[in-house]
Image: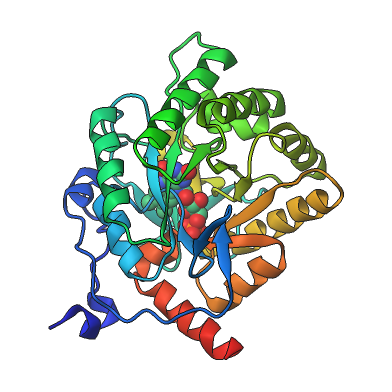
Amino acid sequence: MSASSLPSDRLPRYDRFRSYEWNREHAPDPVDIEVPSVPGTWDFCGLPIESPLGIPAGPLLNGRWCLYYASLGFDVLTYKTVRRCFHPCYEMPNLQPVECGQVDEQTGELAASEKMQGTWAVSFGMPSADPDIWRADVEQTRRMLPDRKVLVVSVVATVESGQGTEELARDYAACARWAVDSGADAVEANFSCPNVCTPDGQLYQDAEAAAGVAAAVRDAIGGVPFIVKIGHVASVEAAGALLQAVGPFVDTVSMTNSVATHVRHSGQLLFGGQKRGICGAGILEASVRQLRLFAGLEQKGFGPVRFIAVGGIRTADDVRRCLEAGAVMCQMATAAMVSPDVAIRIRRELALQQG
Ligand SMILES: Cc1cc2nc3c(=O)[nH]c(=O)nc-3n(C[C@H](O)[C@H](O)[C@H](O)COP(=O)(O)O)c2cc1C
């Protein structure tokens, strides 16, 4: 059967019952499938693209995964967060489905579910290949990606005990420079990972440190488009402080990484009792609220910064809502992993509505 006639439930996807390493090694080949055009003119930080649809850091474990999702109608591909050294993945489960409605900062814990119903707890710990491997892979991927597809590389620092903000900033900056030297069209610095306890995971909650790191990265990459990825921020004070701190250095802020909660299974807390980032349909409302909060502040002069909407997006209506709320681009991790043809369905609907 040719790829274009493959039923959507037969498209290859990440297998959550297997390890991260297995999934990295078993990346699917690009498919030859019809991708509907989206009316309008789109760009990402000035780089021309064909739709406002992208994949955030996470599902694209290496260059082959980037090429696969590029063939499925995504235009901005974010290479999963990399580091200055090899870093192992947490043990399984890396993806634990949960029972929930809409999740927010008041949600203390969620029950694990056997079946994926649209929302899961994510627990990878930001693994990374050795830099020699990811740098060569980024270089090759950029060469193989079609024009008008943007390759973003997400980076994070690797903190040793006793290190302060200066070392953290130097580490982020060095990884960012390597990404650019390897051909990345844009760099994303991950300032939020609810699944790690080190300062790199909480940087978005410390405006002063975030500004220091953002300044160092900007210095290292010159005029290359620069995104900062942040976690869940619900208060106007915290949002204003963060935007003022990073605004002078970044082109775009990407939100929301996830909303962190505990997860309980058969009476026991999973993940050693630590919180994990909840991703997927259950964080859509919290993400849209946060986007509106930041976009409102930006209009009051806390900028100029543009916004990438992430968190719970899975339909054309979600995309429209996020664009109306002030985003320039919409990215999907969970929806794209569960339904690899989601961009094709959204593009078809956007074309019909505007046609
Ligand atoms: C499998 C998986 C791995 C992820 N890994 C990363 C990562 O390495 N770096 C990062 O910034 N975010 C990571 N994320 C978070 C996503 O980029 C995104 O912010 C989150 O999943 C919310 O979007 P969604 O609701 O569309 O899944 C990961 C998410 C998933 C599902």
Q: Is residue 179 left or right of residue 288?
A: left
Q: Residue furthest top?
A: 162
Determine whether 275 is above or below 100 in the image. Answer: above
Residue at figure coordinates x 63%, y 39% from the top left: 250
Q: Find residue 247 and report its horizontal and vertical position in percent.
A: 71, 38
Residue 10 location in percent, x, y?
A: 22, 76
Q: Quadrant of residue 203?
A: top right
Q: Is residue 78 left or right of residue 12?
A: right
Give residue 150's position: percent from left, percent from top.
43, 55
Q: Give the answer, above or below, for where 54 lies relative to 81.
A: below
The percent position of residue 281, horizontal first and vertical second, equals 52, 65
Which of the two residues, 252 or 341, is positioned nearer the viewer here? 252
Report whether 151 appears left or right of 61.
Answer: right
Q: Nearer the viewer, residue 82 or 223?
A: 223
- Quarter-of-image position of residue 101: bottom right
Judging depth in this view, the residue of 12 and 173 nearest the camera is: 173
